[in-house]
Image (cartoon, rainbow, N blue to C red):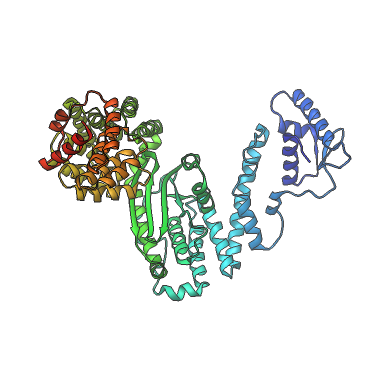
């Protein structure tokens, strides 16, 4: 039966407080702040609406006399009654766990008079849940019992990551679950015992812990390979043992994974670190992403066959958590900076979105956006790196050989390197500008430094690939860009353009065409596409794309462009000239 929201608040208050009857005046003060004469009038209107809900003669849960509000004699069912009922421990723990995935009176427009009371009830519910958790742990026997205990422990740790007693109980439950799973235990041999005193280096615990989420593999629910699922479980449990991060509970992580707008969900839950996982025939792939700067801190592929997972899953889990802990330490200062100036990082991330398309309008939009970020903070090295890239990319896209653009790109990248020597993207942009200035060896040195600082930064590897192609090493360049695409499968268009260039100089013209076809906007690669079709023997398509390229840039001068194109060996220029001439340039 529908009731007005304020009537539901009154009903909830009476049920939770155990009050069968309360004065109308008292409830009016709780439900309406301000002028109490107005509150009484509003209460009378509410009573009239409640009585209309019972117009068919069915008794409602609330009844009113001239002076009081009363609960009806009929039994009233409420989900929060689980906190006061006396049912078996483990089923009750499960019911509480499900209920606490939402807050008590969540998303309701609470009256001012109830806010303090509601907060008290929420705290009391969590305390009841914690007390029952320890009782359930003592009563657990079967594997399903231990699974329920573990899920509840992780839920408690998400709320209070510093609860040492719950953390120890979680690790104990994990060990007990394994003992009750004999087939796996027999196969696992010597186990690496997980403990909060494991090889993970200690970290200072900040006042407000950053939040980390482990996104399970897409097929985790349907994966029938128990060792694979157990490996993800081991990683989750080990992460929960860290004292310097709050781990998002698995049910929330699963919802984020399934959500169409993951970024919005990550922001909603104030998550700073994402551990993304994928299980396939090639084994387990794990990457750690720092959301404030949208950067990959670490990534690794563990090529383990399902048969090997059973015996090595604990060791692999500990290796992964040790790596994660190390990167948590390294980003402590950056995270503190983000918390102090979040608007700078948001502006920077918005600016980088314009670089997903390799077109002149997008590059110029990105430049203006990076400049706006730098107005907020002039020494923000990531924004300087992005600004440097816009100069280098404009030089490529305009094909006018404007050296001033490259000089600006190099100077801006050098400023970024000076401000933050450990920033891989700064070295990446320095390498890109030096590449187009013709300093191929200096470029390779900068890209090597970038990859050394961040071996899994796809953008740095992409730039390194470009430099190798221009250094007349297209095979090495193709290997690098293939790695970059694997690390960043939903990559920007310039990745495919570089892969196409490497394929062209290897004489794999159809492969070059295939890479360009994968670009979201291939207009910037029209000349290379025309040359590739010409070398592949399709003159008609070559000339069609040549006409489109000329329409986009009528001032293109073949000889002038080839004279400034920075390649180390003449054979590359000759091969490119041959394709362009055949296409009609």
* Residue 290 falls in image quadrant: top left
Report x, y in % for residue 117.
66, 40
- Left or right of 532? Residue 286 is right
Report x, y in % for residue 174.
49, 65
Foreground: 156 or 48?
48
Looking at the image, which residue is at 87% across and 42% down?
58
Report x, y in % for residue 305.
38, 66
Q: Which residue lies most toward the left here?
A: 570
Foreground: 426 or 200?
426
Q: Quadrant of the C terminus?
A: top left
The count of marks equals 0
- Left or right of 493? Residue 30 is right
- Left or right of 13? Residue 355 is left
- Left or right of 6? Residue 401 is left
Looking at the image, which residue is at 70% across and 54% down?
84
Q: Quadrant of the N terminus?
A: top right
Q: Which residue lies most toward the right here?
A: 57
Looking at the image, which residue is at 39% across and 61% down?
281
Report x, y in % for residue 173.
52, 65
Foreground: 545 or 274?
545
* Residue 146 falls in image quadrant: bottom right
Q: Is residue 523 above or below residue 323?
A: above
Foreground: 566 or 50?
566
Residue 461 visible here: no
Residue 49 visible here: yes
């Amino acid at each position: 039966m529908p009731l007005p929201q304020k009537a539901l608040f009154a009903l909830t208050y009476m049920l939770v407080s155990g009050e069968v009857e309360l004065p109308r005046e008292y409830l009016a003060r709780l439900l309406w702040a301000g002028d109490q004469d107005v509150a009484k009038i509003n209460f009378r209107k509410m009573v009239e609406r409640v009585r209309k809900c019972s117009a068919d003669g069915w008794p409602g849960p609330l009844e009113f006399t001239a002076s009081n509000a009363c609960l009806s004699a009929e039994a009233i069912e409420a989900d929060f009654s689980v906190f006061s009922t006396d049912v078996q421990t483990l089923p009750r723990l499960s019911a509480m766990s499900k209920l606490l995935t939402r807050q008590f009176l969540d998303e309701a427009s609470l009256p001012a008079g109830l806010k303090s009371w509601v907060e008290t009830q929420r705290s009391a519910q969590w305390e009841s849940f914690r007390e029952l958790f320890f009782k359930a742990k003592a009563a657990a026997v079967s594997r399903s019992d231990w699974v329920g205990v573990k899920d509840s422990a992780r839920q408690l740790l998400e709320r209070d990551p510093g609860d040492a007693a719950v953390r120890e109980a979680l690790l104990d439950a994990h060990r007990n679950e394994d003992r009750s799973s004999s087939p796996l235990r027999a196969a696992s041999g010597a186990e690496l015992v997980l403990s909060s005193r494991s090889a993970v280096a200690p970290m200072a615990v900040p006042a407000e812990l950053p939040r980390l989420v482990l996104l399970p593999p897409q097929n985790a629910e349907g994966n029938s390979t128990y060792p694979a699922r157990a490996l993800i479980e081991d990683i989750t449990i080990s992460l929960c043992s860290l004292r310097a991060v709050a781990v998002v509970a698995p049910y929330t992580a699963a919802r984020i994974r399934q959500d169409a707008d993951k970024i919005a969900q990550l922001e909603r839950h104030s998550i700073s670190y994402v551990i993304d996982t994928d299980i396939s025939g090639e084994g387990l792939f794990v990457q750690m992403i720092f959301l404030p700067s949208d950067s990959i801190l670490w990534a690794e592929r563990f090529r383990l066959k399902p048969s090997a997972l059973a015996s090595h899953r604990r060791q692999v889990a500990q290796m992964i958590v040790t790596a994660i802990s190390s990167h948590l330490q390294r980003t402590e200062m950056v995270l503190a900076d983000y918390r102090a100036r979040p608007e700078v990082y948001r502006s920077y991330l918005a600016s980088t979105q314009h670089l997903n398309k390799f077109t002149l309008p997008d590059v110029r939009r990105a430049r203006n956006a990076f400049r706006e970020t730098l107005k907020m903070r002039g020494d923000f090295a990531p924004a300087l790196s992005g600004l440097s890239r816009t100069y280098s990319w404009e030089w490529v896209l305009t094909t006018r050989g404007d050296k001033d653009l490259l000089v600006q790109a190099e100077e801006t990248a050098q400023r970024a390197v000076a401000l933050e020597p450990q920033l891989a993207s700064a070295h990446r942009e320095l390498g890109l500008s030096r590449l187009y200035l013709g300093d191929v060896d200096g470029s390779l040195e900068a890209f090597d430094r970038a990859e050394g600082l961040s071996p899994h930064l796809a953008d740095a590897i992409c730039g390194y690939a470009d430099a190798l192609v221009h250094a007349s090493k297209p095979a090495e360049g193709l290997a690098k860009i293939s790695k970059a695409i694997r690390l960043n499968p939903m990559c920007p268009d310039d990745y495919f353009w570089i892969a196409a260039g490497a394929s062209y100089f290897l004489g794999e013209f159809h492969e070059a065409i295939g890479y360009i076809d994968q670009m979201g906007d291939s207009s910037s690669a029209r000349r290379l596409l025309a040359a590739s079709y010409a070398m592949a023997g399709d003159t008609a398509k070559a000339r069609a794309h040549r006409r489109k390229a000329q329409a986009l840039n009528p001032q293109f001068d073949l000889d002038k462009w080839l004279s400034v194109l920075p390649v180390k060996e003449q054979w590359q220029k000759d091969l490119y000239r041959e394709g362009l001439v055949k296409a009609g340039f």
